[in-house]
Each structure stands twice: as structure tokens, then as C-alpha cells.
Image (cartoon, rainbow, N blue to C red):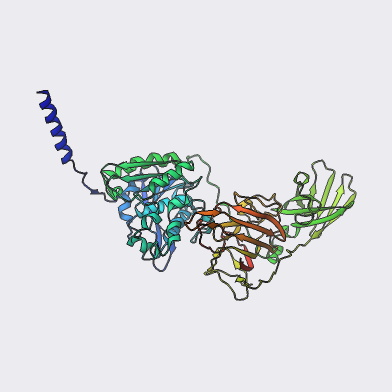
Amino acid sequence: MHRLLICLLALTLSTSAQTIKPPKFQLVKSATPAGFTLKTLDVAAYPEHTVQLLVYVPDKPGAYPCILDIHGGGWQKRQIESDKPMMERLAQRGFVTALVTYRLAQEAQYPAAIEDVKAALRTLRAKAAELHIDPARIGCIGGSAGGHLSGLTAMTSGITDPQEPGPHPDQSSAVQAAIVMAATQDLAAANKEKTSENAIAFFGGSYAEKPDLYVAASPITHVRPGVPPTIFIEGERDTLKIGRAEMMEKLKAAGVETALYTLPQAPHPFWMSQPWLDQVIDIATPFFKKHLGEPKFTSAKAKPAKPEQPKFTAYTTPEEATEKDPDFAIQGEFTAAIEDKRWGIQIWALGKGEFEAVAYQGGLPGDGWDLDRAAMSRTLGRRDDALGKVVFESADKQLRAEVTADTAEVFDGQGTRIFEMTRAHRNSPTEDAPPPAGATVLFDGKGINRFPNSRVTEDGLLMEGVTSEDQFQSFTAHIEFRLPFMPDARGQARGNSGIYLQGRYEVQMLDSFGLDGKDNECGGLYKIAAPSQNLCYPPLTWQTYDIDFTAAQYDATGQKTANARLTVTHNGTVIHNNVELPAPTGGAKVPDSATPGPIHLQNHGNPVRYRNIWILPK
């Protein structure tokens, strides 16, 4: 009897298992939840499509975390309506939620879709106040093709935003957390043997025809320390997951939080239907709350918010700066010989009549300075309108300097004039350097301009945010640039740009006149090397970079055998000597590979000007 019961039980369980069927696919209809208004914003208008944001804005004022949805549809179908129920439910959990109608493959090929997503993120931040968004707390989610774009958005956060086309270049397109649902993360691996029709439409060619694009568009390519926490949700019956396991291993190795959630019996696309929609919400809500936080509501007694500060004024010509800001005439360099010893002083404007003077033993940087940083001194000064000069005074009151546009007179504690410094006007020794035989002239201001879709000033100067049509391997390069006068700005907001070699390696351009000379200042290689000394001239002075670049080397299998190297001469002085570049620097649009790459001049929202650009291949 005992054996018979066991057999019957086994038969019953077996029969029961065979009859279990997946839950019925139940589509969910969209309905704007109570307490929210659905707003539509234009992001960017193109002939083929106007990119829009659909935003669920809570009626209750506050600073809410925000989640951007990136819809799926094989990059060829606009599945906004199908994703709305998910975003409506997430909105009810304490978020502002938004959906973006990016351009489809038949409207514009890669990278249009990712550019539209990042433009949408910048727009959300630019409109944060009216949408009740905390701009520092934005995440993204997407499934299928949208999952690919969600992963790519997360993995390229902080890399590309200064250069991205579209509106609001002063805003960031970074996300602080991301969810990827049922999406391929390695498009190269997925399409190497046989390229899908969707991928061909997206890229305008097969993997064999455009391998670099497939690699560059793969989220797994861009995994590195510092990318936002990223989790994956997959259906048990879904097959779109190539590269996900490998990407998770890379994320873990980089110290980035990641996890996988597999929904039993779930098909593709599970997030559009019940019972799996609720399961997605139960996973997404605590993840986003952990990394984006809760809403912050405005108290009834709270003080009104301060009005948005205006952007920093930027003067782009010496004539304009001289006419409109008297501080420009003071800022600059001064030298003197005192008791057979030379001294140099750089005075840089802090805005509103305030300055800082930096003193160097031996002369100015690149012109006699003895490189003794311990002997440098910094002294604050202020415009004295009654005296008609800018006055600097040492902490012990034993030295006082009175500065005009031409001279700096120095007095002792008793008021006795002890010496005078005169203004120095320096020009780079390579300014106006002619292109040698065999060089490719990219821009000369006289008719040659090999930067497509570029902007040029009325006086023939190239403006920021351009990429050359030519691609290069190893070369020497010459470029002349002029930084704007922005006395109220500081740090990365002050005259920021950069030249990207092969679109991969940046030499920073920044108004760091009078600063220490760090890896994120003028001449710096970000997170790789600071310049040996700060050769940055005063703003609105023409400066030069002469760069000797050796491309990275690869063997026949595509493995890198030697890193790229460069030597940089800034205004006639070598500031980097044969420095090794282990990987592309931040903001690079072209991934590491054996292929050549363009010259890119970064747009960081500041009006930097360029002229006399030529490349001599090696």
C-alpha cells in the first residue's frame, strides 16, 4: 500500500506539472493617475520627427526623483503607449516619470536615438523646476531596444555629455541609476555571425560593414568604474540577453552595483502586461528609491526659492572685454629684475573688481620660472576706485602693490616705492606656424574648413563643437585657440573646451590662467597626467598646441600591443613628454580600437575660438 501511494502521488505531480501553463498575457491600458498631469514637451525638431517628452508631473509641489523610460520596438516602432502603464505605476510610487519619443531607425540611423535620449535628459534638467524634478536624481529604464539604449545611456554617463548635439548643452545627460530589461548588451557579438534586419536598419549596414559602430553602440564596451548602479530584469522565456552575463561580470569587477531578476514564465515583452508588470514595479521601486531617494516636499513656511542665476558672461574679443569690463585691462602678466633676480607675476580676475596675484621666482611659467612651487605666493587684491588702481597687500602689511593696466608698483610697509614691474605681452613662438609639406589643413579661416556642419564667426574663426571629416592614425598636429574672458566663472565653467585626438584622447583647453596646472586644467590629460607647468596665457590671447601623437598598436587578432603616446608643446614649452595613454579619456566618442579617428573640438557651452589647424600624418 505504501509503495502504491508513492506511485500515485508521483503520477499526480507529474500530470499536474504537465498541465501547468504560463499565465495569460494581459495587456494593461494607460490611464493618467489621480494627482498627476501628463505634459508634453518638445525636445528637438528634425525634418523627419520632433522628439518629445511625455511627463507625468505630480500636482503636489516638491523636488521629486525622476525616471526616464526609453521604449522598445526594435528601434523601428514607437511603443510609447505600451510603456505608459509602467510609468504611471512608478509615478504613483513617488517619482516624476517621463517617456521620450526618440527618432526611429527609418527616420535617422545611429547615433540619433541615443543622442535624442541624452537630449531628453538635458531637457528634463533644464525644465526641472516646472516639472517638480530634482535634477541631481534622475534614472532610466527601458526594455528590448529601449533596454539597449538604457544600458548605453548609463554606461556612457559622464563621458559624452559635453559634446552631444541638441538643446541645453549646459546641462548633464548623466543618470544616477538604470534598469535594463530583456536587451542585448553586446551588439557586436550578437550580430557578428548573422546581422539582424533590425540592426542593419539601425546602423545602416551589417556588422561586417560597420564593426566599429556595433562596438561603440554596445553598452558592454563602456563599462568602467563610476558608471551608475545598473540592474537587469529578464523573462524566463526571453532570449534577448546576449552580453548581459559578461557585462555583469565587468560591472562587478569595476565595483558597480548590479543584479539579475528573472521573472518566471515571462515572455517578451513582459513589462507591458500582467501579471509581470506588477513584478517589474516591485523590483524597480526599491532599486530607484535606494539610488534616487524620496520626494522632498516644500514646506508651507519655506522661503521662496531663489531665482535662477544667470549664465556667466563671456567676452569673445579683446575689444568687447575692454569696452564692457574694466577688470580685463588689469588681468595679465608682469615681470621685473630685482637685485639680479627675475620675478614674474600673473594677475587673474575674480570678477566684480577682485583679483588674485600669483608670484613666481625666476620669471613667468615657460619663461624663466624655476619650478619651485613652494616659493610661489598668492595675494588677493581689490579695485580702489578712489585711487584708480587695483591694490594688493601682503598679510603682514609689509608689502603693497598698486597695479594699473601697464605697471605694478611695489611699496614697503612705510610706503616707500621699492621696485616696479612692467606688463609682459607674450606670443607663442609657434603662432601662425605654416603647414608643412604633406600636411592636411583642417581649417585656415580663408576657405579651407574640413569640419562638417561647423559654425564660423564673422571674422573667420572656427567655433566649438565640431568633428573633422578626416580620420587619422599617428600624426603631429598644430592648433591655435583663444579662450573667452569669463571673470565670474570658476573651474570647468571657465572657458572650457578640448581637442580630442582620434576622437579618443583629450588635451584639455580651459581658462586656467594663474592656477596650479592640474590634470583637469589647461593642458591636462584628465585622470592621466597634469602638465609639467601651467603655460596657459591670459584669456583672449592666442595660444598654441603642437602635439606629437603615436596611435595605439594592435596585432592581427585585434589585441592591443602598445598604448597610444603623445608629447604636447603648449605655447612653445613641452608640458607632456611621451606620455602613455592607457585608454580613451572622459568624453571620448570613439572607443579604443585599431581604426583611425577624427579631430574633435569639444563643446562645453563656452565660446572658445580656433584657427590655423593642420595635421601632418607620420
For the point 30% across and 53% down, the residue is 82
* Left/right of residue 265 with respect to residue 439 in the rendered view: left
Q: Position of residue 264 (x, y in %)?
A: 27, 41
Marks counted in the figure total 0
The answer to which of 320 and 44 lies nearer the viewer is: 44
Residue 611 position in % (x across, y down): 64, 68
| Residue 63 visible in rendering | no
Find residue 29 and report its horizontal and vertical position in percent. Answer: 26, 51
Residue in the foreground of this view, choosing between 256 and 456 = 256
Q: Nearer the viewer, residue 341 or 31?
A: 341
- x and y percent of residue 517 in the render? 68, 51
Return the residue found at the far front: 556
Q: Residue furthest top?
A: 2
Residue 355 to residue 427: above or below: above
- Asked whether, in this view, residue 279 is left or right of residue 556, the answer is left
Report the quarter where the N terminus lies: top left
- On the question of residue 134 being in view, the answer is yes
